Amino acid sequence: QAAEMVEKTEGPMSPLLGWAYHGIGIVAFPMEDYLEGERALERAVSISSACLGPENSRTLWSKHALSVTYWYAGKTREGHALGREVLAGREKALGPRHPTVAWSLYSLGDQARQLGDYAEAEVFMERSIRIREEVLGPEHHYVGTSLNGLSAVYTEMGRYDESIGLAERSLAIMEKAVRRLEKQIKTQSRADEAARRLMQIKGVGERISTAAVAYAGNG
């Protein structure tokens, strides 16, 4: 219904309409309505490609969502192939060492592992790790995610010693990330409490001022 309203006001080839269909596809995914998701996202990709270009960030996000939808709908080869298109588009648009490129590499690496293409999975995961370490820092939790992904690849390849080593590194990074997050939550909690107290003090101050004015008037 939202897409129909946008189409009436903006026309059938509007970027806003493409983004509306993107939203429909995203909503359909957690509901496991993959057919509806495919239809909406295919329309989103078509419109965005025509209006904004095939390498525009919105087009690529719709393509990425469509590739994941294909994958979960059982169209694994189609999903993987489209994911490779997304990777190529992101590398061209953002450069080969962008965090979003690393996300595509990780996703493709995990898919390649599930497809049994371990050599390709290893290459994708290793690139993902290198980019994330360089751009985000070696202790970032996304680095831990990629290390864990490569560990899974090595496990299925029978390279158990390497897999364990990577899993241990990943766990250490994730534990540090959890501690940092807990500290941030505590800090934010203190900040929220301070803000509440400040508002209380301000309220008391206003009441005192009002009382003082009233007292002066009576005097």
Image (spheres, rainbow, N blue to C red):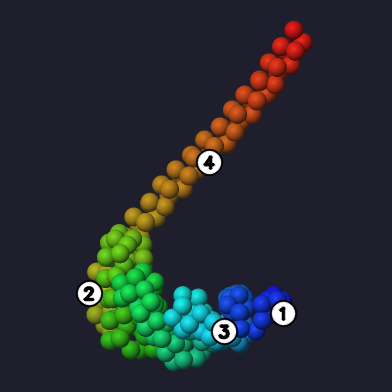
Q: Name the residue beneath numbered marker 3.
A: 47
Between the residue at mark 4 and the residue at mark 1, the CA separation in whole angstroms equals: 45 Å
Q: Which mark is residue 161?
A: 2
**Mark 4 or 2, closer to the camera:** 4
Q: Earlier in the sequence, mark 4 or mark 1?
A: 1
Q: To which residue does mark 1 refer?
A: 8
Give the mark toward the camera: 3 or 4.
Answer: 3
Mark 3 belongs to which amino acid? Ile
Q: Position of residue 39 (x, y in %)?
A: 60, 87
Marks 1 and 4: in contact by CB < 8 Å?
no
Q: Quadrant of the N terminus?
A: bottom right
Could you tell which of marks 1 and 2 lies nearer the N-terminus? 1
Dot 2 falls on a residue whose secondary structure is helix
Tell me the element at label 4: helix
Q: Earlier in the sequence, mark 4 or mark 2?
A: 2
Q: Residues within 10 Å of mark 1 (few under 14, many from 20)?
A: few
Q: Quadrant of the C terminus?
A: top right
Q: Which residue is mark 4?
A: 192
Q: Which amino acid lies under the numbered mark 4 shown in the image of this protein?
A: Asp
Percent x, y for residue 119?
28, 86
**SS for dot 1:** helix
Q: Residue furthest right?
A: 218
Residue 55 visible to the viewer: yes
Q: How far is disc 3 from disc 2 in space, using C-alphas?
A: 48 Å
Q: Residues within 10 Å of mark 4 (few under 14, many from 20)?
A: few
| Mark 3 vs mark 4, CA separation in Å | 44 Å
